[in-house]
Image: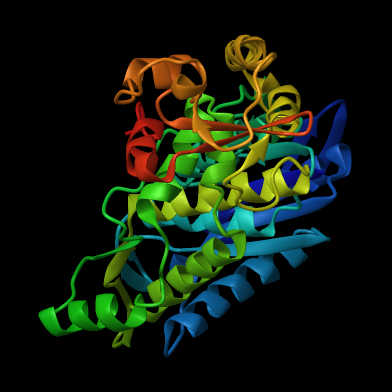
Amino acid sequence: MKILMAPWGNPGGWKEVTYVFDGKNMKSKTSLEILQEVIKPDKTIIICLDTLAEEGKNYKEVRENAERRIREYADKFGLSNYEVLTAPGIGTFPNGIFRGDALDYYHYIIAKLNLNFEYSNLDIHLDLTHGINYQTILTYRAIKEMLELFSIFKKTRFKAYNADPSSPTIADKLFINVVEDTIPIPMPSAEKISQGRPLEPVSLSSEEREVLFKNELKNIKINNLELSAFIGALYNGLPLALFRFYPEKDKIEEVISTVLNTYEKYVEVKKEDKLKVTRKVKFGKDFKVCVFTHVIATLLKKLKLISSRKKEVALDEIENLKENLFKFDKRFKMRIEDDLYTLKKDLKEREIRNWQIYNEVLGKPIGEPDARNFLAHSGFERNVVEIKKKKNDILMRYHENKIRVVVDLCQRGLR
């Protein structure tokens, strides 16, 4: 899917100039018009700020007012077939004062874009011409991080554009420049759940804090340690752990929706001589982890690699994961291949009718799992993995009494 995105500030002061791109000229007040014509995207997304709002009795009305203004401008500029994503902004303007955490913009668009993406190959075109201040760099950062994760599973491409920096009073012709054209490098997420708090208080009273954590977020029930273990399983190349800690995708999606709704509920809106919008909570780092976990779980399921949590995993399922997932990192693929070769050689002539610890099968004493061996051998550490043969199939699982240890080992290297 080809998607054209553009962060927009306030279009009210934009002047008509001639934009030049790919050998074509077009008079317009926005670079997006000529980019739409040349690139021919399947979808165009304008990311605007709620700071454009002039009216609103509550935050829903504030967002709607800002979006309506953007649509009015976009229609006047001749744009068509576009969507508008209105994200939280900060600053003091003639129309209002907007207070909150700048990174809320980043977390918000990551969640909204990932929930709305079709999980297919992605060809992303990002026009940075009209973005302002923090908006530009946070949009760029969010898109790049998302594509690095997506590229583990799908083909991705990223192109960024920016028009010549110039004043319309001096130059009436602006060239649109390609400032980046890359195939993103596959990059697993390296962040784990820290406090298990996707929302953090900013300016709440003690009573409001109690309501937030005991009432508003009480239905958020996820196993933080196992969620982090799942993230670590991809990051460290541990196929058996990916099956064992695969999360309930629908529950994570519910968590994301609950957090977004609760966040907006805690935005205070007042109107005196102008709007005053105060965000009383902010997104925590754990919110991003939930969003990226949802992406990983969704793509694993869509590609029919893992569809649900499994404690007992057949060797051919591990082989399939090695070939079709871990190809994104040749080091992981080769290591898993070597470990599976050793395992098959060790077990070839043995009958194992009941579950046994790997070391027990080899006639060796069972000890405590070694962190280095666990990570160096794809999670097939011989003191925690149990083996069983069923007809010609080799089955593997982690010993349930050692699950907490496995959870900790999976998270090595995460921050």
Q: How many marks?
A: 0
Which residue is depicted at the point 56% across and 48% down? 246
Q: For this rendering, which residue is in front, 190 or 233? A: 233
Residue 342 placement (x, y as % from top left): 61, 10
User: In which quadrant of the rendered view does residue 161 lie?
Assistant: top right
Residue 397 placement (x, y as % from top left): 54, 38
Residue 413 placement (x, y as % from top left): 35, 26
Q: For this rendering, which residue is in front, 279 or 97? A: 279
Which residue is depicted at the point 35% across and 75% down? 217
Q: For this rendering, which residue is in front, 43 or 70? A: 43
Instruction: Tell which residue pokes out farthest to the left in this image.
Output: 206
Q: Is residue 54 above or below residue 390?
A: below
In the picture, measured across the screen, residue 125 lies left or right of residue 64, that is right
Which residue is depicted at the point 57% across and 60% down? 248
Q: Is residue 269 above or below residue 256?
A: below
Residue 166 seen in render: no
Residue 295 seen in render: yes
Q: For this rendering, which residue is in front, 406 or 321? A: 406
User: In which quadrant of the rendered view does residue 201 lie?
Assistant: bottom left
**Viewport quadrant of the C terminus:** top left
**Viewport quadrant of the N terminus:** top right
Q: Is residue 199 above or below residue 293?
A: below
Residue 211 placement (x, y as % from top left): 24, 83
The scheme the figure's colours follow is rainbow
Q: Is residue 86 above or below residue 247?
A: below
